[in-house]
Image: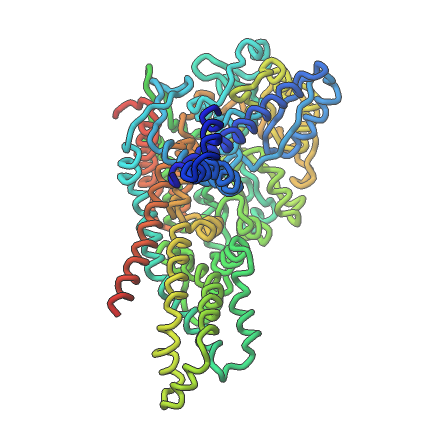
């Protein structure tokens, strides 16, 4: 009898709990739906982290009374933003729009976290460079609108280059290595550059060398992280690390900026969006910095790298895919929005109309009054456009970041690291049920 | 409802029936009283655990390139086999075990020593020291970890700089030094907390015991070793169990330290490995790794309890 009253109490409690949980979720989504359609105003949520996106959203809301977008600032993608979006998509309450880097878009597609907006976004295709459109189109379906691309360049201290006898910034990687040796020989506490642990920066170096990581063959993925072309890039940087010619501060870490400010690190090979980050992090160097094209492998046939670039993706379960695509297209193509994104976010626009935006020809005081976007503009024609990202990039980039960190302290070598990352990536893809060639 | 009414009517007639109905009716008030506990318990505690175990038995199935929405398939314990077959995850389990094996006894010995010193009659400034030793615990763990990160960061560390002056070339974030550095952070943060628990137990020991021992010619050390330590055994057992569970859940310190020591792998501890799996959108693997970690903490802490209980019985 006693046992029965216990089980009865437990049963009631379980039912009450279930009702509570069910009540919460159904009430929640019901409220959201009715709010979204009340008075004919469509409400969209937009998750992202880039500075300046909120201002473009505000501009949109002013001119579009029927669509109101709310921008929620999340942690940056690799610092938890993507995990938040994926978790929300899994739980069925993702926002309509999310800032998703091209590198992560295939992972989102493989997680089933995106909404196909081909029929709404198709008209916008002509307004973008072909290769950027390819980054948001996977398996023939378009999942968002490209915002920017990220050509890489060499950002350097003009005055200190001169001080150590480097009259022109290195044009080739051979010259870069020679200059690194020259600077370090003149003062052992000074380094030409930093070899950080940012996996996407490293991806840009591989991209430049034509050392692709992923491909597809029929119904199978191919992983080529450990290919001969990749080993060549790894070998070059390992050579510089072995001679201790590069500083190994973690990427975007206060220690790196403190070294830049004190003149211990003289340059950085990084993407266009890093230009305002350096400007904001080493304010005292204002006017002394400059931007030059990134060093190339072959001066006769210059090819440059790309590090980043993102899309405004339409996430799973968006009930207003048409309006979401409309906003995303507007944000990437409207002249006012693009000027704002160039000025505040430091983007290099993906929309072809954006390339003539006057904000791109504004002189930059931090970089000695240089019109820095001219450098990036000249490079874009020479960036390989057939680079492809894989479906488990989050894992690959984590493994790569671990390996880069280890390589910086001598725990492993870059060529060994590539073999490890290759193995882990293939294993991870298989574990997620994907078919991989050669296994 | 009809049955209840019928029984209630019958209950009025016989004493036995009344007793039976009384028991039957008690069910509802019991449920009502238990609901404030059971509803949150089930919704917030049992359900998530159940869901985690459920998730660990499935895997996402994709076809070919995997660009269409995945489906969930039941795989039984295959995820457990995969997790335990993963060298990184096994390494992380082994790492927290080793850190715990060295750090927990050291920290508790230190805590016991400090507690005994505070308890000793001759100690001056008791209040000040009690607060000073406890203060690191009052600091949020993350803040303590950030502080220590800067104290050991290459290029910034005053410890390394001082060592350099003395001709010692320390690198507190080298691969070999990572575990000792993390152990140091844990010890710094938790010794005072454990000390306070042991100290409270010491305070509960009747003063007569020590007085009697003194009269019998026992030294202060003898009193501590022969009387006080055996009497605070329950407190030592409790702090050990807490520390075992705490070490198994190691996350804050390595995660913060990673910012200045990029050679610290992203799967350094089991929790960071599980978090890594979430980031890689592999929720099933994360659930599996969480369950394994929970089992490990359970086995270790209960194993320890069983061990000391058996020993206690023999003594």
Q: Nearer the viewer, residue A181 or B77?
A: B77
Asked if B1 appears above or below B187 in the picture, the reply is: above
**Residue A66 visible, this orientation:** yes
Q: At x 38% / y 44%, what residue is drawn?
A: B267
**Place of residue B33 in the rendered image (x, y in percent of width and height, measured from the top left):** 52, 42
**Place of residue B301 in the rendered image (x, y in percent of width and height, measured from the top left):** 34, 54
**Place of residue A279 in the rendered image (x, y in percent of width and height, measured from the top left):** 63, 42
Give the number of marks. Answer: 0
Q: At x 32% / y 58%, what residue is drawn?
A: B305
Asked if B33 appears above or below A315 in the picture, the reply is: below
Image quadrant occupied by the C terminus of chain B: bottom left
**Place of residue A156 in the rendered image (x, y in percent of width and height, measured from the top left):** 57, 42
Left or right of residue B294, residue A31 in this image: right
**Residue B48 visible, this orientation:** no
Asked if B292 appears above or below B248 in the picture, the reply is: above
| Colour setting | rainbow
Q: Nearer the viewer, residue B186 or B12?
A: B12
Q: Nearer the viewer, residue B5 or A289?
A: B5
Query: Which residue appears farthest toward the front when viewing the image?
Result: B13
Rendered image quadrant of residue B10: top left
Left or right of residue B135, residue B165 in this image: left
Q: Nearer the viewer, residue A398 or B198?
A: B198
């Amino acid at each position: 009898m006693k046992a029965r009253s216990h089980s009865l109490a437990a049963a009631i409690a379980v039912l009450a709990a279930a009702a509570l949980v069910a009540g919460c979720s159904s009430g929640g989504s019901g409220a959201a739906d009715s709010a979204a359609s009340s008075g004919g105003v469509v409400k969209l949520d937009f998750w992202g982290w880039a500075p300046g996106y909120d201002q473009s959203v505000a501009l949109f809301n002013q001119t579009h009374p029927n669509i109101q977008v709310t921008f929620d600032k999340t942690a940056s993608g690799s610092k938890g933003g993507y995990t938040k979006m994926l978790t929300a998509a899994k739980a069925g309450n993702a926002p309509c729009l999310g800032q998703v880097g091209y590198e992560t878009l295939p992972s989102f597609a493989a997680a089933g976290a995106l909404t196909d907006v081909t029929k709404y976004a198709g008209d916008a295709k002509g307004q973008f460079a072909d290769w950027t459109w390819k980054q948001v189109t996977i398996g023939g379906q378009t999942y968002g609108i490209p915002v920017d691309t990220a050509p890489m360049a060499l950002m350097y201290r003009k005055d200190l280059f001169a001080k150590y006898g480097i009259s022109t910034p290195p044009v080739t990687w051979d010259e870069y290595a020679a200059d690194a040796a020259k600077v370090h020989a003149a003062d052992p506490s000074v380094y030409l550059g930093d070899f950080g642990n940012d996996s996407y920066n490293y991806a840009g170096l591989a991209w430049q060398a034509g050392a692709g990581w992923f491909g597809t063959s029929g119904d199978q993925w191919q992983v080529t992280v450990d290919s001969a072309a990749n080993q060549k890039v790894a070998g070059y940087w390992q050579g510089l690390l072995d001679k201790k010619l590069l500083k190994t501060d973690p990427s975007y870490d206060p220690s790196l900026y403190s070294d830049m400010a004190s003149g211990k690190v003289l340059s950085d090979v990084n993407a266009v969006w890093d230009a305002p980050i350096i400007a904001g992090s080493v304010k005292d160097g204002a006017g002394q910095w400059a931007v030059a094209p990134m060093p190339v492998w072959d001066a006769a046939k210059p090819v440059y790298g790309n590090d980043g670039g993102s899309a405004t993706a339409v996430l799973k379960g968006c009930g207003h895919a048409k309006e979401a695509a409309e906003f995303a297209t507007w944000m990437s193509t409207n002249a006012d929005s693009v000027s704002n994104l160039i000025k505040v976010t430091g983007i290099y626009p993906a929309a072809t109309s954006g390339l003539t935006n006057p904000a791109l020809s504004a002189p930059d005081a931090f970089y000695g009054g240089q019109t820095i976007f001219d450098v990036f503009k000249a490079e874009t024609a020479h960036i390989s456009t057939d680079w492809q990202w894989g479906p488990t990039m989050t894992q690959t980039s984590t493994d790569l970041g671990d390996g880069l960190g280890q390589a910086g302290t001598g725990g492993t070598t870059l060529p060994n690291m590539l073999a490890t990352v290759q193995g882990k990536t293939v294993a991870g893809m298989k574990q997620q049920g994907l078919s991989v060639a050669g296994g | 409802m009809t049955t209840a009414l019928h029984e209630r009517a019958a209950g009025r007639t016989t004493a036995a029936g009344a007793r039976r109905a009384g028991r039957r009716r008690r069910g509802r008030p019991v449920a009502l009283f238990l609901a404030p506990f059971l509803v949150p318990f089930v919704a917030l505690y049992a359900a998530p655990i159940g869901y985690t175990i459920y998730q660990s038995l499935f895997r996402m199935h994709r076809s070919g390139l995997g660009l269409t929405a995945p489906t969930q398939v039941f795989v039984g314990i295959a995820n457990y086999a995969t997790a335990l077959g993963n060298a990184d995850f096994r390494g992380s389990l082994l790492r927290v075990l080793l850190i715990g094996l060295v750090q927990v006894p050291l920290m508790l010995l230190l805590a016991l020593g400090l507690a005994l010193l505070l308890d000793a009659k001759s100690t001056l400034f008791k209040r000040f020291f009690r607060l000073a030793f406890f203060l690191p615990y009052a600091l949020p763990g993350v803040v303590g970890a950030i502080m220590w990160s800067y104290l050991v960061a290459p290029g910034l560390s005053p410890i390394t700089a001082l060592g350099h002056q003395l001709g010692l070339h320390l690198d507190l974030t080298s691969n070999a030094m990572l575990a000792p550095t993390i152990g140091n952070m844990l010890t710094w943060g938790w010794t005072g907390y454990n000390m306070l628990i042991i100290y409270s137990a010491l305070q509960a020991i009747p003063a007569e015991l020590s007085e009697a021992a003194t009269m019998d010619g026992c030294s202060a050390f003898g009193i501590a070793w022969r009387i006080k330590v055996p009497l605070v055994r329950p407190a030592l057992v409790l702090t050990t169990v807490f520390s075992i569970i705490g070490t198994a859940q190691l996350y804050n310190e390595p995660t913060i330290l990673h910012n200045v020591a990029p050679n610290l792998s992203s799967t350094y501890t089991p929790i960071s490995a599980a978090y890594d799996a979430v980031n890689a959108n592999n929720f099933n693997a994360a659930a599996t790794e969480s369950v394994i970690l929970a089992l490990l903490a359970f086995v270790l802490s209960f194993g320890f309890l069983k061990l000391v209980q058996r020993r206690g019985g023999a003594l």
